[in-house]
Amino acid sequence: MDRIIQKITTNLWFDMNAEEAVDFYTSVFNNSQIGRVTYYSGVGSEKHSFNAGKVMTIEFQIEGQDFIALNGSPAFQYTEAISFIINCESQEEVDYYWGKLAQGSDEKKKQMCGWLTDRFGITWQVIPVELNQMLFTGEAKKVERLTNALLKMKKLDLNELRRAYE
């Protein structure tokens, strides 16, 4: 992994399962890699209660985006207010990412419009690029039909969206 530090890096707080999460994400995205790992030293253990030698952070990269996974605690939880958008070139790509990221997730956490929350609590939007093109360049009536169809879907169906648009 490149040692140049990205100006803004996403830090993901995990409840002591950062290694499992990083292994999962780097298996889902082909263009990914794991970088440097830091370990708790024992300093401050009276405050954080992590033993020396336990993984503290793992740098990783997916699709050119740098992340840091932190082994924290259950003190902080994710919400759907922040999500990662995966711009997909085809229905096959939508199906792939939706299927992989949904593995082990709660059915109730699959929301309309291509949103899902994975088993680690991270929210993703799996979106075909063509949807954005239709929304931004279409006539008002086409966009209205498209939006009505979109609001009825969890995993997006590009062919159904095209039909609604036309």
Image (cartoon, grey):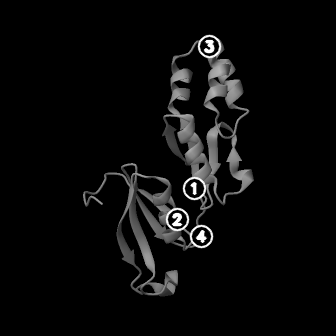
Measure the alpha-carbon separation of dots 2 and 3: 42 Å
What's the distance in space between the residues labelled 1 and 4, CA to CA?
Answer: 16 Å
Query: What whole-number distance in Å separates the C-alpha atoms at marks 4 and 2?
Result: 17 Å
Give the side of residue 47 with respect to residue 156, left or right. Answer: left
Which disc is residue 104 wearing? none
Earlier along the polypeptide chain: callout 3 or callout 4?
Answer: 4
| 3 or 4: mark nearer the eye | 3
Identify which residue is drawn at 28% across, 57% down.
5
Q: Secondary structure at mark 2?
A: helix
Q: Is residue 81 visible?
A: no
Q: What numbered label is drawn on residue 140?
A: 3
Which residue lies under the disc numbered 1? 122
Label 2 close to label 1 by CB (< 8 Å): yes
SS at mark 1?
A: loop
Question: Label 2 belongs to which residue?
Answer: 21
- Above or below — where is 78 with respect to 161? below
**In the rendered structure, are the residues bearing label 4 and label 2 in contact, judged by CB atoms less than 8 Å apart?**
no
Q: Of marks 2 and 3, which one's residue comes earlier in the chain?
A: 2
Residue drawn at x 36%, y 49% is 64
The kind of residue tagged 3 is Ala
Farthest-out residue, left: 4
Q: Is residue 108 visible?
A: yes
Tell which of 59 and 163 is nearer to you: 163
Marked residue nearer the N-terminal end (4 or 2): 2
What residue does disc 4 label?
A: 75
Instruction: Point out residue 144 in the picture as x, y percentages from the top left corner.
Output: 67, 19
